[in-house]
């Protein structure tokens, strides 16, 4: 049955792709965004669509909507290291107050609520790969604490609304995701290295490059989130690609994929930068019958083409 779905952060990287998927599935979408890190160009192709409505709104303020709402997907949040340093208070507020307001709307409308959480709740993990029952190793007063703790609080608030107000909730823990519509200057590894390669600049690798990451293409992530929305899985679910590689290996992959002659330079490792990051997706495989399909070469080809454009 077609649903009326609210997507907070609808003009962001993930929010806009999620909106596209919901509309493609026949649903009506109300997108909310205050454009602090979102970009209307990400949803410009939906202008005038009869099943999409955009509202400029800060979700840390009271949310009022007429009519029924079937689901709320809370994706509003800055999500890059540069954002953490430039707008730490807004990052905390959208994770705390924004989640509270979005949950309040879900309670009022008797709607299903899906929280976009993150692998950052695991911090610099001491368990590898990271399963959902790992509690994490987070520094609350470090430079990443505003984001990590905002998301950990958001998860706690979501569970409290489920237990106390019987709101029907879902939590997705999103691991490194890449693809078209990423902000070129957001400080994350994929757009940073691709941008440097395309401009002919040296590629920056922090530390010795031995720290590991795993990269999930955006279409795979959106598929997992959509399956989670329609599932009965109330506990947190990791969605990400378990194919792990070192940052140095990834920089070399970007060199080859872009045909760049750029050299690799090393800079000091940022404070609290995770040494390992790889999801345990056993729960997603079991409950959602989901696993990533898009290989790194295929995903990077599409992403590089977007950045060239």
Image (cartoon, rainbow, N blue to C red):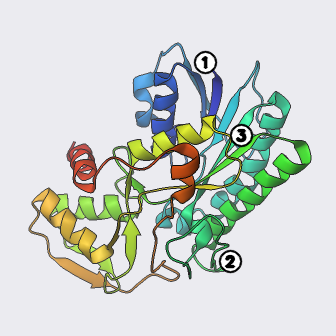
Q: Is residue 9 visible?
A: no
At numbered mark 1, what does the secondary structure look like: helix, strand or loop?
loop
Residue 140 circle label:
2
Q: Position of residue 25 (x, y in %)?
A: 50, 23
Q: Residues within 10 Å of mark 2 (few under 14, many from 20)?
A: some
Q: Residues within 10 Å of mark 1 (few under 14, many from 20)?
A: few
Taking depth in this image into account, of 174 and 290 the one nearest to the observer is 290
Query: Which residue in the structure is indicated by mark 1?
Result: 2
Mark 3 or mark 1: name the one nearer the start of the chain: 1
**Residue 172 sits above or below residue 11 on the image:** below
Q: Is residue 191 left or right of residue 16?
A: left
Residue positioned 45% across, 68% down in the render: 278
Q: Position of residue 94 (x, y in %)?
A: 68, 53
Residue 113 circle label:
3
Residue positioned 58% across, 25% down in the render: 29
Residue positioned 59% across, 45% down in the render: 75
Q: CA distance from mark 3 to mark 1?
A: 16 Å
Badge 2 vs badge 1, beta-carbon distance below 8 Å: no
Q: CA distance from mark 2 to mark 3?
A: 26 Å
């Amino acid at each position: 049955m077609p649903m009326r779905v609210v997507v907070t952060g609808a003009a962001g990287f993930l929010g806009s792709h999620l909106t596209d998927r919901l509309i493609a599935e026949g649903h009506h979408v109300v997108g909310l965004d205050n454009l602090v890190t979102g970009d209307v160009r990400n949803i410009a192709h939906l202008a005038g669509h009869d099943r999409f409505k955009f509202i400029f709104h800060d979700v840390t303020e009271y949310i009022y909507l007429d009519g029924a709402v079937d689901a709320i997907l809370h994706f509003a949040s800055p999500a890059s290291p540069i954002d953490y340093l430039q707008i730490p208070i807004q990052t905390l507020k959208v994770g705390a107050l924004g989640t509270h307001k979005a949950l309040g709307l879900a309670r009022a409308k008797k709607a299903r609520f899906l929280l976009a959480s993150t692998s950052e709740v695991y911090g610099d993990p001491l368990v590898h790969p990271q399963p959902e029952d790992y509690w994490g190793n987070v520094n609350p007063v470090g430079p990443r604490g505003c984001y990590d703790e905002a998301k950990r609080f958001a998860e706690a608030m979501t569970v409290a609304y489920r237990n106390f107000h019987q709101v029907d909730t879902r939590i997705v823990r999103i691991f490194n995701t890449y693809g078209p519509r990423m902000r070129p200057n957001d400080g994350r590894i994929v757009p940073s290295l691709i941008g440097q390669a395309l401009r002919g600049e040296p590629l920056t690798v922090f530390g010795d490059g031995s720290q590991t990451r795993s990269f999930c293409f955006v279409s795979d992530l959106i598929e997992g989130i959509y399956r989670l929305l329609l599932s009965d899985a109330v506990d947190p679910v990791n969605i990400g690609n378990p194919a792990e590689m070192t940052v140095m290996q990834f920089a070399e992959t970007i060199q080859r994929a872009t045909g760049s002659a750029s050299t690799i330079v090393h800079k000091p490792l940022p404070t609290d930068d995770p040494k390992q990051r790889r999801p345990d997706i056993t729960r997603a495989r079991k409950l959602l019958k989901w696993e990533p399909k898009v290989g790194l070469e295929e995903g990077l080809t599409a992403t590089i083409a977007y950045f060239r454009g």
